Amino acid sequence: MTKIKTAIVGATGFTGSELARLIALHPSMDLVAITSESSAGEKFSSIHPQFFGLVDQILIRADEIEEKNIDLVFLAVPHGVSMHYIELWKNADFKIVDLSGDYRLNDPETYESWYGKKHSFTEAFDYAVYGLPEFFSKEISKARLVANPGCYPTSSILGVYPLIKENLVDANRIVIDSKSGATGAGIKAKSGTLYSQINENFNAYAIGNHRHTVEIEQILTGKTKSATKVQFTPHLLPVDRGILSTIYAQKTAEMELNTQRLHELYREVYADQPFIRIREEVPGIKEVRGTNFCDLYPTYDPRTNNIIVISTIDNLMKGAAGQAIHNANLMFGLKETAGLDLISLKP
């Protein structure tokens, strides 16, 4: 079988390096080009030494990849940058998985409101597909541009969805507290992610106005047809990677409910999904580290009448690179789990 000729645009960040690791091990992909505008001419392994002797390709500029007869491009560049490449390659033959937020939302007006920047190529909103495989696998399989979901929304949406789908809760009164490792902030140094700031520290940020709020609301509203509003608060954990979301929703359904029934319901909803695990015990982030799993633990508190759901993912995997590979597998008709049969790195 001919391998899929694959390129990563913007491979010097955490997500780019994780994509390189997964593609290098993928049975059906061949990593033929890796780009960096700032480090072109250098070896990829000189930027990410863990690849020494394994992925030693010379980094090229993005405008050179069309010479490589590419089948698939992963865009691992910041918000506001992806749209320019997607416009540049709008008539190209290769397919694109965009890991930025440029096409995750429903329309350019909402994007501009929440991201605070002008959208320069709105045409692609007409054909971009939101890349949450558990919801949109058929659409993804036919897409030429997939908008890879945000890491926080992935954890949150998968945890909340069964509650709204089964009409168990008020969709307008959902609280989500999410905690992420420092890699979620990217590789560039910022004052808030310096070691002296995050070590032995724990803080919330972007309270009430984080851009992932609207992504969560739009996807849940569109999928369930129930207008959804969430109170979303992100936090920064003093760890490398991983997201743990704690979701609170008050039961409004008249049906009798207990934790066992909740577990049965979640298993029914996600019965055919290879990367969703309904756990018998409360999961931690180390149990999904380096994997594409989303581990869910729903429970019911009869004293408060609240449903509480714990959702854990690796922000660089199910929250980014792993999900991007899952999307690419669907786009090229491969087995969903190809290249993603991974066991967590623990300890």
Image (spheres, grey):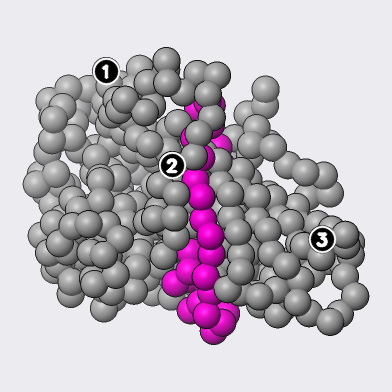
Between label 1 and label 3, give the one nearer the viewer: 3
Q: Which residue is mark 3?
A: 304
Place residue 306 in its image quadrant.
Answer: bottom right
Secondary structure of the residue carrying numbered label 1: helix
The relative height of residue 333 versus residue 5 in the rendered view (above or below) is below
Indicate which disc residue 181 carries: none
The quarter of the picture where the N terminus appears is bottom left
Residue visible at 63% across and 29% down?
A: 345
Indicate which disc residue 205 carries: 2
Q: Amino acid at mark 2?
A: Tyr
**327 magenta-colored:** no
Q: Residues within 10 Å of mark 3 (few under 14, many from 20)?
A: few
Q: Where is residue 232 drawn, in percent x and y? A: 51, 56
Q: Are marks 1 and 3 in contact (CB under 8 Å)?
A: no
Residue visible at 53% across and 60% down?
A: 231
Secondary structure of the residue carrying numbered label 2: loop
Q: Is residue 223 left or right of residue 287?
A: left
> Mark 3 to mark 2: distance in Å?
27 Å
Q: Amino acid at mark 3?
A: Thr
Residue visible at 48% across and 64% down?
A: 216
Q: Is residue 308 left or right of residue 15?
A: right
Res 92 seen here? no
> Mark 2 to mark 1: distance in Å?
34 Å
Whichever of labels 1 and 3 marks the residue nearer the N terminus, that label is: 1
Whichever of labels 2 and 1 marks the residue nearer the N terminus, that label is: 1
Q: Nearer the viewer, residue 247 or 302?
A: 302
Q: Where is residue 174 drawn, in percent x and y? A: 61, 65
Indicate which disc residue 46 carries: 1
Place residue 165 in its image quadrant.
Answer: bottom right
Q: Which residues are magenta?
A: 216-243
